[in-house]
Image: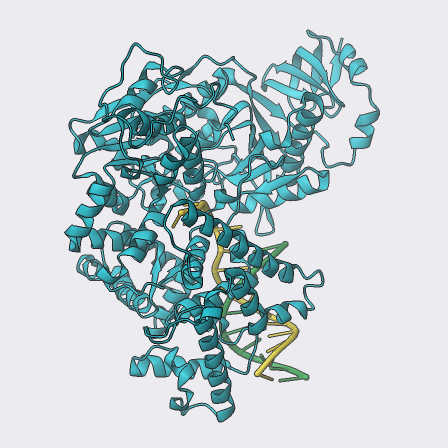
Chain colours: A cyan, B yellow, C green
Amino acid sequence: MIDPQTSHPPAPTEPTPLTGPTPRRSTRPGRADPLLDDLTTPQRQAVTHVDGPLLVLAGPGSGKTRVITRRVAHLVTRVGIPPWQVLAITFTNKAAGEMHQRTAELVSERQGRALSVCTFHSLCARLLRQYADRLGLPPGYSIYDTADQKRAIKQALSDLEINTKNFPPGGVLSSISNSKNELIDAAAYQELAGDFYSRTVAKIYAKYTQILTRNHALDFDDLLLKVVQLFREHPDVLKQLQDRYQYVMIDEYQDTNHAQFMIANALANRHKNFCATGDPDQSIYGWRGANIKNILDFEAHYPNATVVRLEQNYRSTKRILALADNLIRNNSRRKHKDLWTDNPQGDRVQAVTTRDERHEANWVVDEFRRLHDQRGTAWGRMAVFYRINSLSRVMEDALRDAGIPYQIARGTAFYERAEIKNAVAYLRCVVNPADEVSLLRIINTPTRGISDKTIKAMRAYSVANNVPIDSLLGDPLKLTAINSRAQTALAKFGKRMDTWRHAAGFGEDETVVVDEPVAAMSLRGFVEDLLRQSGLEDACRNDKSDPDHERLANLGELVSSAQQFEHDFELELELDGTDHTPSLSEKLLAFLERISLVSDVDAVDPDQGAVTLMTLHAAKGLEYPVVAMIGVEDGLLPHERANADKHELEEERRLCFVGVTRAMRKLYLTHARYRTVFGQSNATIPSRFFQEMPQDCLEEIDALDDDTDGLADSLSQRSLPGREAALYPPGTLVRHPQFGLGRVIEIHPTGSHTRARIAFNTAGTKTLILQYARLERIE
DNA sequence: AGGTTCGAGTTTTTT
DNA sequence: ACTCGAACCT
């Protein structure tokens, strides 16, 4: 597969075999090289940089991915660096996959496979499995997502008898998470805690850590934290890794947090071949602990660093770029770049005022339909961005009603469904018996006679005697507080779990050798059996609240995804050349790890031929010819929670900048006069960011009088746009009920509508749709 | 034991 | 408006 954007074929003269001539440490400048031919001077400078620290400050659409992939290919095929010495870290799994593929196209198949391209979290998960024994980690540890974390926090709160009112789990969790990212553990947090709130959080933090340890579980932050710990406590491991990964590249460096900074630095510290790419203006994860100073202070950390600025934009029109540039100039905490482009001027960016969120969604849908029907723009080339997920709903409804294909970038949504979470919890329990959060989730799901009372008794016993809760399944007689019927139910369930565990190849004691027929079982088969034997499948089949058996279908989908994963995983190992057939237990471990680390954008398929809906955060790194940003209102963008803090406001501005710069040709920024929140309609104010955009790049569209709710659509179909236009030639003096007197500047029919640009005396210049604007001709 | 109803909290963004 | 948990009912 060749990227259509790559205008040249991936040089057939390659590859240079691994066993080729002695590595050359320089390239010959005069000779044509397909890796360098079509690059600009700064791009080439970045690509041909070999040793020593390098910072690439890449503006939006400046060909950053191309530079990274070319640089890897250059290192491998021109300089002669063994591909397995190259480590490239990206922000999402999808980005990793794409980068891996695009790089692999430039080198030999064999070399491509030997490259390491992954995210920080997947790298860490892998290292922790590999070096589990060094840290005393159980190899089957669970990775807790936010929902699991909240349950653990709630458990901590109830163990400590702390009121969830004053200490909301979410808030406590984010305090803990921020601390972890700063490498502050529970003990250090306690030291720093001054006020009552922090002192209490310190207690919860300690308890939470204890619960996770007891459950053999790590949260997302722990993945990073434990690797930092691994490097600190085991210098030999670090040295081994430093020598293996001599060339370290980190993309989206502006979004790395302190822990990630420590990991990257530790890895690159020995050889100093550290290439960071990113753009401080696109740093949008500060709330998650990302430290923009990592990129701003790069040169201070590496005084001899080479810095390359990529300022030419290949993506957007002049107007879109100028609008973005003007906006971002309002930030103070940045490294200025002179963004420019050779692309055409393009249309003005349309700033659209609509009545409410339904009207807004319908306006976007109508406009997209017009572009599709009249200009032949494919659905897959259009996208809608919003600040918060809840805005997707109206948009979805409108697209569905209009019969337009769409996809939502919510890769994790599937795994958040209750039936899927249950199934996954079973799998986790099989792999990790100590995982109490997962166990409690499924112990009576579907119901099997284990009541809340029984569960309470189990927890009480487990806490009082400091024994793992799962041990009670094998020995329920210890629980004197419950009746014999409950004890039997527990024992039966314990037996069931043991059978699965054995089938999966996880013996209770390490000496158990897996039987032959068991080892031959597939991951798919195992998941299927588990769904059937656990009763999950029957529960879904008999679920009366789900007549379409959607849940059952989802379970089927999980089986398919297990099968798909199994196939990919085996293929991967096979291609790796390692002569090793993975056992069921290995496959299961890897499958669970994958499930835990999927991200929202991972599900976006650009070739699906559907309009794509996503949050501004998920949009980073993507581009679309047509983009509509909805809900561009104060309180939403910038978000109200960011209003107070100057830094947070700057982050909101960067978020807006990211959204704007995704657009290649057409951009719409819409806001609604009234928006319904919690079922209550509230008046809104257009985003203050509008005032920071250059007016000559904007076109204000007033859609307040449009009828895009479908009622008058049939009427407007009948009107003749051409004739209407003739009635209002440019120069005509008109009166608008709201805007007063104005003069028509230009007028043109567009499909069923006629648009008129009118300069009003007091209300400024607006573009109105003639059929809806109740205009009056003044003679 | 299991289902139902009622009330509270929810919505910022995510690996 | 919608989801989740706790109390309450069968």
Residue plotted at (41% across, 42% down): A92
Looking at the picture, does residue A41 appear above or below residue A628?
above
- The one of A215 and A715 positioned closer to us in this rendering: A215
Residue sitting nearer the eye, A141 or A587: A587
The answer to whether residue A72 shows anywhere in this view is yes
The residue that appears at 44% across and 72% down in the rendered structure is A515
Instruction: Specify the farthest residue to the right.
Output: A718
A698 lies above or below A99: above
Pick whichever, A683 or A83, lies toward us. Answer: A83
In the image, taking residue A681 as reference, residue A128 lies left or right, namely left
Name the spot of residue A441 as percent of width and height, x first: 48, 70
Could one spot residue A164 in this view of the protein? no
**Labels in figure, total:** 0
User: In what quadrant of the picture does the C terminus of chain A appear?
Assistant: top right
| Residue that appears at 45% across and 56% down | A591
Which corner quadrant of the image does residue A777 belong to? top right
Q: Position of residue A544 (x, y in %)?
A: 69, 68
Q: Position of residue A622 (x, y in %)?
A: 48, 32
Left or right: where does residue A757 sit relative to residue A499?
right
Instruction: Pinpoint residue A106: horizontal percent, then vertical percent.
Output: 40, 28
Q: Image quarter for residue A360?
A: top right
Residue A361 against residue A519 in the figure, above or below = above
Foreground residue among A67 and A657: A67
Furthest residue toward top: A731
> Is A589 located above or below residue A603 in the figure?
below
